[in-house]
Structures are given as C-alpha cells and as structure tokens.
Image (spheres, rainbow, N blue to C red):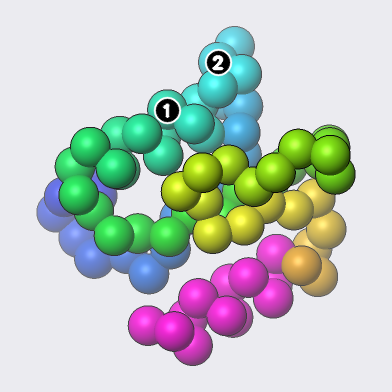
Amino acid sequence: MMLRARYDLILSDMNRGSNDHAGIDLLQALSASDLDIPIVFYVSKLDPKRPIPAGAFGITNRADELLHYVFDLIERR
C-alpha cells in the first residue's frame, strides 16, 4: 500500500504479534524502497537509555509527545 498512495507519516509499534522487531523491519523495508515516509513509534514501554531507532523520526510512550511528533511532521510537509 505504501507504493500506491502518499502518506504523510506512519505510526507504528515496535512489536507486532510474535515479531519483537517488526518496527525495525518496517524501517529497513522503507529504506530499501527509497520511500520518504517518516515513522513515529508509539510503544507501551520506553527504555530512555536506548536511542531512537536509526531512520525513525521519534519514539514515545506518551500521548502528548505522540501528538507533538504528528503535528511537527504535518507542519513540515
């Protein structure tokens, strides 16, 4: 679907089903396809010692920060 439509951003979790690295897999697939769609991860548990995943615009477990990221990205488009 990402190849057929234009998206301003993608909101994703890092885990989907039994795949703990689904978010990283998505980042790699976007990078390989040369699509310029920013990704923000909204997670239930955030480890503040771990950096934002390479290629992601942001990661948060707070709704107010998620809205900040979304508004920031929409303003940039």
| Outermost residue toward the bottom in this view | 75
Residue 36 higher or lower than 42, as above or below: below
- The answer to whether the residue labelled 1 contacts the one labelled 2, judged by CB atoms less than 8 Å apart, is yes
Which SS class for mark 1?
helix
x then y, percent, for residue 75:
49, 88
Asked if residue 17 shows in the view, the reply is no
| Residue denoted by label 1 | 25
x then y, percent, for residue 56:
51, 51
**Rounded to the nearest whole Å, what is the CA distance between mark 1 and mark 2?**
9 Å
Point out the tag, 1 or 2, that comes first from the N-terminus: 2
Give amino acid for label 2.
Answer: Asn
Considering the image in quadrants, where does the C terminus appear?
bottom left
71 is within the stretch colored magenta? yes
x then y, percent, for residue 66:
70, 64
Give amino acid for label 1.
Answer: Asp
Give the magenta part as a residue range: 66-77
Identify the disc placed on residue 40: none
x then y, percent, for residue 55:
46, 48
Direction from residue 68 to residue 28 in the image, left or right: left
| Residue denoted by label 2 | 19
Residue name at image x 24 percent, y 65 percent: 6
Q: Nearer the viewer, mark 1 or mark 2?
A: 1
Sort mark 1 into few (<14), some (14-19) or many (20+) by Cα contacts within 10 Å: few
Question: In the picture, residue 27 is in which quadrant?
Answer: top left
Direction from residue 9 to residue 14 in the image, left or right: right
